């Protein structure tokens, strides 16, 4: 009896800890619904969802990198450089299909480059991708001719803004990306290997896993995600230039970590990333609706992220 | 300073490292600790130095009971430890290293000239001379050790514990170190000397304590001991584990593995051996003699410089462990935690990870097939877990090891390599592991084991190769395999190489 009671108490504590980010996000949601006028409306929630589409695509694939024990700073540069090349292809061919193909190819190439450097150069992935982000960023200027590139046919925006069941096609693509990563992580050999090398790279190698191959594939997928999402974002904005905001990677990593995926690798999941993205999105939306000065928004956002990550560190590693 | 140890016990997981050990370290004397790998001598040294705290027992310094929580505490009582690994800051000068943390400083501004004066004085009084301006990284290891000793003396240490100080020194350097130690004792300091080199121990010690399986066998003086008497006392009769009977009828003359002239710079040389089908070959020798390195090279985990490896007569050119596993070689590594288990994953995933292709289609894993696959082998190896879905790190050391055996055997290898297969494993699991090894060798598997535990070597080996300083120095077969013959071979090799 006593033991059973103890077990159930331990279990409860584990459940609370393991799913802490869900409870906190739910709390924020309920709190905003109660206090903030216009938060709990179909239009507002739909807006939040649609605004997160591009971040979600990048974050889904970046989750793979973090679980594999790596880090990729260069995704911010790929997010800008990919659409520049894609836009050039579109100008030359007037084909939306070729534009997206080019976006995918550029992302994959950049990712494979990162993967090769990390796997064979034995360079810490943070350092390696910090270096390559300069390269990609510089190439963005070269390819754009330092000007603004605009889509030649504005009807192409339909690709991302078309609504199906009230939700934009970009959001549906994000749902697809999340589903793909979920299947990869949860159901495939590749996913197992990602967890294994992130948890203990030497043990994984000795168990017969081709560590380098997995690293290269992982960085390639992340590069693809960033380039593709960046291109979708550029299509929606109708233009892209090399000086566009590279900071998307920070938002993405913040969301992944807030969600509870370990930066040390070996643990994490895609649902955590999705929750992390919305946790931050709700907070930012709450600020906007309450008319808080954007300058302070950033500060508070940073504090909230610290609190979320700190709570996780104090509660012990909870993610899996 | 007189240090008294009373009834000290210490346990690490399933291993009882020390069982109520008592001894006395007198001032101005060299007190040696000898024993096999894992006998508890280093643990004892580290408890006195405050690195570990004991589970029970007392530690008295000059009659006063102390309880060290960290090396910092023991340092305050003038006890310091010089560990096997040099712990200096390589890119700083000798003087900076010696006074690291105790600089003459005014408002954090280090007074260099004064430090230099103090250093010169320290060299003079101790009789240990090292160029103070040189970077530590530029010094030879023997000189770095002198820096460590100077650092201890700069803190006015009364008792220095040295763990295997000569393990990486040449014969000449070792004899110089022994002179330094004699000098220290003349100044009334005591030295606790932990070493594998029995000739050195006999030469330098005032007192010798022999340990075995965490227990103290006896404390005596060098004139009462000989090389042989020490070896006998160190091996003695071992506790606990027993072994399945050896079956030799199944051994096939055809080798599963043949290694020819394997060489890896600074690791090992001239390694040639055969492992026959149905045979358990044990590679032994002291820690650091290159045994694990040879295994890793055969498994493709490390590259080697020259030589050839054949599996069932076919030459292998492995570029990594994944190819070794495909070819039919599986290795259980030395460190279960660092190189074996995937701690964050379930037992099921830990076993199936090398064989996921067998249970998946188009890269998608069939969970049920996978679960059946893993369960089959956890049942065979007798892994005890609440279920195969729990994290492997929640199992006991013995069950983790059995799970790793399940992983290895699931591949049905032609050659099974096991590096210290029973380290940190309880007695019952040990027996289970020996049974697994025996039954699979009986079925024609070639088995290559590295072991430091003499009873284990004698208990399971059909044939023994003894390694010393990167070379195979002795082969023992059948009735030649006894604890004393194995140990004698290990030390002979070492002492010859060391020039003693």
Image (spheres, rainbow, N blue to C red):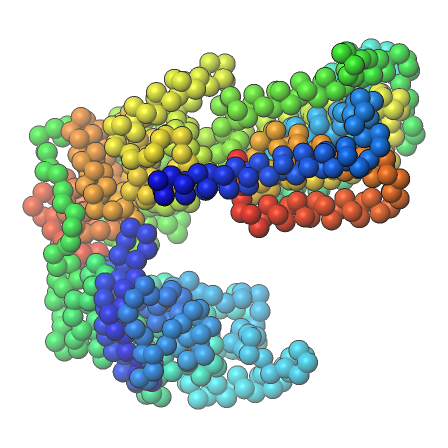
Q: Nearer the viewer, residue B163 or B254?
A: B163
Residue at (30, 73) in percent of width and height: B58
Q: What is the quadrant of residue A207 in the picture?
A: top left
Judge whether B281 appears above or below B284 on screen: above
- Rendered location of residue A117, percent (x, y): 62, 37
Q: Nearer the viewer, residue A71 or A293?
A: A293
Residue at (64, 26) in percent of width and height: A221
Q: Nearer the viewer, residue A106 or B302?
A: A106
The answer to whether residue B83 is seen in the rendering is no
Left or right side of B262 for B349: right
Q: Nearer the viewer, residue A194 or B367?
A: B367
- Rendered location of residue B33, percent (x, y): 25, 69
- Rendered location of residue A43, percent (x, y): 83, 22
Judge whether B264 appears above or below B45 on screen: above
Residue at (32, 63) in percent of width and height: B55
Residue at (45, 34) in percent of width and height: B345
């Amino acid at each position: 009896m006593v033991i059973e009671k103890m077990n159930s108490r331990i279990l409860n504590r584990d459940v609370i800890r393991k799913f802490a980010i869900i409870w906190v996000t739910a709390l924020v949601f309920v709190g905003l619904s109660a206090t903030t006028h216009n938060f709990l409306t179909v239009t507002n929630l739909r807006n939040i969802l649609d605004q997160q589409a591009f971040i979600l695509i990048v974050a889904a694939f970046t989750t793979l990198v973090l679980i594999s024990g790596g880090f990729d700073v260069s995704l911010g540069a790929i997010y800008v450089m990919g659409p520049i090349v894609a836009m050039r292809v579109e100008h030359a061919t007037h084909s939306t299909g070729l534009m997206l193909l080019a976006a995918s190819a550029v992302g994959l190439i950049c990712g494979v480059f990162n993967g090769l450097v990390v796997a064979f150069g034995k360079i810490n992935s943070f350092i390696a991708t910090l270096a390559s982000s300069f390269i990609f960023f510089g190439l963005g200027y070269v390819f754009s001719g330092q000007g603004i590139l605009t889509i030649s046919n504005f009807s192409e925006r339909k690709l991302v803004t078309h609504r199906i069941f009230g939700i934009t096609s970009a959001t549906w693509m994000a749902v697809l990306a999340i589903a793909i990563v979920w299947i990869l992580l949860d159901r495939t050999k590749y996913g197992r290997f990602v967890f294994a090398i992130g948890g203990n790279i030497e043990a994984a190698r000795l168990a017969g896993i081709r560590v380098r191959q997995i690293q290269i594939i992982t960085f390639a997928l992340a590069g693809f995600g960033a380039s593709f999402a960046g291109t979708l974002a550029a299509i929606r904005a109708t233009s892209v230039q090399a000086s566009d905001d590279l900071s998307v990677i920070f938002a993405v990593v913040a969301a992944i970590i807030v969600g509870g995926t370990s930066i040390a690798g070996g643990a994490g999941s895609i649902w955590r990333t999705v929750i992390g993205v919305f946790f931050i999105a709700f907070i930012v939306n709450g600020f906007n609706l309450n008319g808080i000065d954007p300058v302070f928004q950033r500060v508070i956002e940073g504090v909230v992220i610290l609190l979320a990550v700190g709570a996780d560190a104090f509660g012990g590693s909870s993610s899996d | 300073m007189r240090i008294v140890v009373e009834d000290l016990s210490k346990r690490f997981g399933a291993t009882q490292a020390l069982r109520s050990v008592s001894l006395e370290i007198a001032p101005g004397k060299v007190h040696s600790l000898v024993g096999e790998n894992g006998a508890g001598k280093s643990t004892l040294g580290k408890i006195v130095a405050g690195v570990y705290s004991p589970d029970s027992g007392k530690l008295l310094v000059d009659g006063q009971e102390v309880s060290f929580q960290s090396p910092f505490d023991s340092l305050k009582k003038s006890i310091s430890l010089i560990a096997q690994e040099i712990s200096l800051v390589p890119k700083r000068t000798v003087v900076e290293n010696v006074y690291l943390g105790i600089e003459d400083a005014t408002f954090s501004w280090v007074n260099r000239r004064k430090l230099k004066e103090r250093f010169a004085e320290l060299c003079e009084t101790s009789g240990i001379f090292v160029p103070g301006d040189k970077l530590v990284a530029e010094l030879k290891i023997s000189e770095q050790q002198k820096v460590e000793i100077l650092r201890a003396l700069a803190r006015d240490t009364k008792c220095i514990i040295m763990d295997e100080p000569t393990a990486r020194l040449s014969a000449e350097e070792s004899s110089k170190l022994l002179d330094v130690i004699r000098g220290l004792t003349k100044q009334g300091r005591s030295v606790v000397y932990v070493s594998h080199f029995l000739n050195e121990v006999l030469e330098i010690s005032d007192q010798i304590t022999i340990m075995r399986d965490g227990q103290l066998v006896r404390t005596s003086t060098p004139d009462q001991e000989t090389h042989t008497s020490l070896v006998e006392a160190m091996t003695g009769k071992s506790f606990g584990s027993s072994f399945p009977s050896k079956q030799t009828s199944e051994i096939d003359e055809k080798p599963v593995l043949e290694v020819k002239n394997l060489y890896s710079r600074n690791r090992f040389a001239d390694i040639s051996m055969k492992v026959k089908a149905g045979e358990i070959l044990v590679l032994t020798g002291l820690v650091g003699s290159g045994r694990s390195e040879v295994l890793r090279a055969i498994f493709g985990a490390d590259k080697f410089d020259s030589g050839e490896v054949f599996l069932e007569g076919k030459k292998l050119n492995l570029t990594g462990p994944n190819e070794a596993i495909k070819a039919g070689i599986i290795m259980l590594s030395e460190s279960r935690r660092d190189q074996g288990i995937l701690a964050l994953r379930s037992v099921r995933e830990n076993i199936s990870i090398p064989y996921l292709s067998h249970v998946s289609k188009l890269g998608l894993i069939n969970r049920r097939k996978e679960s059946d696959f893993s369960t089959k082998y956890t049942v065979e190896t007798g892994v005890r877990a609440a279920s195969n879905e729990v994290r492997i790190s929640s199992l006991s050391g013995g069950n983790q090891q059995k799970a790793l055996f399940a992983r290895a055997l699931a591949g049905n290898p032609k050659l099974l390599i096991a590096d210290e297969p029973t380290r940190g494993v309880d007695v019952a699991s040990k027996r289970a592991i020996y049974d697994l090894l025996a039954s699979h060798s009986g079925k024609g598997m070639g088995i290559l084991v590295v072991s430091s535990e003499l009873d284990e070597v004698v208990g399971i080996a059909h044939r023994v190769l003894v390694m010393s300083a990167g070379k195979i120095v002795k082969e023992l077969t059948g009735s030649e395999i006894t604890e004393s013959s194995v140990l004698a071979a290990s030390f002979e090799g070492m002492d010859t190489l060391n020039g003693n």
